Image: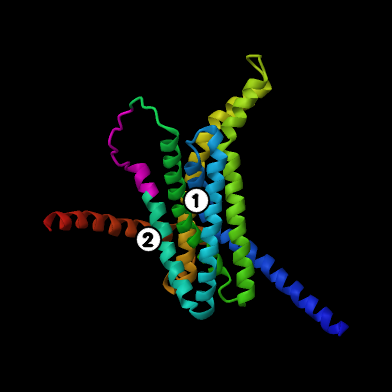
Amino acid sequence: MASGFFVLLDDIAAIMDDVAVMSKVAVKKTAGILGDDLAVNAEKASGFVSSRELPVLWAIGKGSFINKLIILPIAFLLSAFFPVAIIVILVLGGAFLAYEGAEKIFEFFFPHKHAKIEVTAQTFSEEEILAAEKEKIKSAIVTDFILSVEIVIIALGTVIEKPILTQIMVVSIIAVVATIGVYGIVALIVRMDELGLKLIQLSKKERSISKTIGNFLVQALPKVIQSLSVIGTIALILVAGGIFVHNIDFFHHLVPQLPSIVKEFTIGLVIGFVVLAIVTLIKKILPKKEVAE
């Protein structure tokens, strides 16, 4: 009996060690999406009255957790009974990520002309403010659902050949990290300016360490969000390229002498612009058909 118990403990230790190793791999694979998730949510959670930033972020965070509770069982069922679907979804997700990255790069070099918005002085009731807040929260949760699907599928793709128990443990760990880690960091980011203002108010002197740090934090917030967006875009293309290289033989054996990071970025970028061109063409054709009808 004792020997059997120790064998069981040894098996559990081996599983946990395998889970730890695969979790590290999964974190690296999902880093690009997590970076994009961080940038998107920092942008979505900003722009509210200071007192409402954390409640709004908490509401989005709860929505993100519910999203993952919905996605995870479906992903595990597909992995157990129809594993090919995971690879298909992974490649399609890679195409979406590449498109998203290419679109951001295209928008940076060729920005769309946006209609001028006339600013008028208007007083909104509390009900109208709360309704607008709910709409923004709902939009953020929908965006999070798409990003959560990508995170879960990419994480699952790294352990698709492992036993189902390892898959469940690894992907669940990534889901928890993605929710708590991302929204915890977003909370710190959106409160940077508030902390900066408090530091500025601490000292009455024109020049002081607290005022210098405070001014730095206030001015740094928009730059931090912008930097996250740039880093997230690059990471999106790298993750997408990695998905294509590791799951499609043609790309895996293409130009083997190139460093993997260069190869993955190039393939991700090229496919991203191809998908962007197709989507743009479809968008141009569809309105014409609607007008004709």
**Residue drawn at x 27%, y 54% as measured from the top left:** 280
> From the image, which quarter does the C terminus lie in?
bottom left
* Dot 2 crowding, Cα within 10 Å, few <14, some 14–19, many 20+: many
Tell me the chief SS of the magenta region.
Answer: loop
Seen in the picture, residue 121 relative to 289 is either above or below; the reply is above
Q: Residue furthest right?
A: 2
Seen in the picture, residue 204 relative to 231 is either above or below; the reply is above
User: Of callouts 1 and 2, which one flags the residue occurring earlier in the amino acid sequence?
Assistant: 1
Find residue 101 and report its horizontal and vertical position in percent.
Answer: 42, 52
Residue where numbered disc 1 is placed: 36
* Mark number, residue 271: 2
Q: Is residue 258 visible?
A: no
Find residue 210 and report its horizontal and vertical position in percent.
Answer: 67, 23
Residue 153 within the segment the image draws in magenta = no
Q: Is residue 204 visible?
A: yes
**Residue drawn at x 59%, y 34% as measured from the top left:** 192
Residue 109 within the segment the image draws in magenta = yes
Find residue 292 and report its horizontal and vertical position in percent.
Answer: 12, 57
**Residue drawn at x 40%, y 62% as measured from the top left:** 95
Callout 1 amino acid: Asp
Q: Is residue 129 left or right of residue 68?
A: left
The secondary structure type at the circle numbered 2 is helix
Q: Magenta region: which residues?
A: 104-119
Callout 2 amino acid: Ile
Mark pair 1, 2: CA separation: 19 Å
* Mark number, residue 25: none
Q: Nearer the viewer, residue 50 or 107?
A: 50
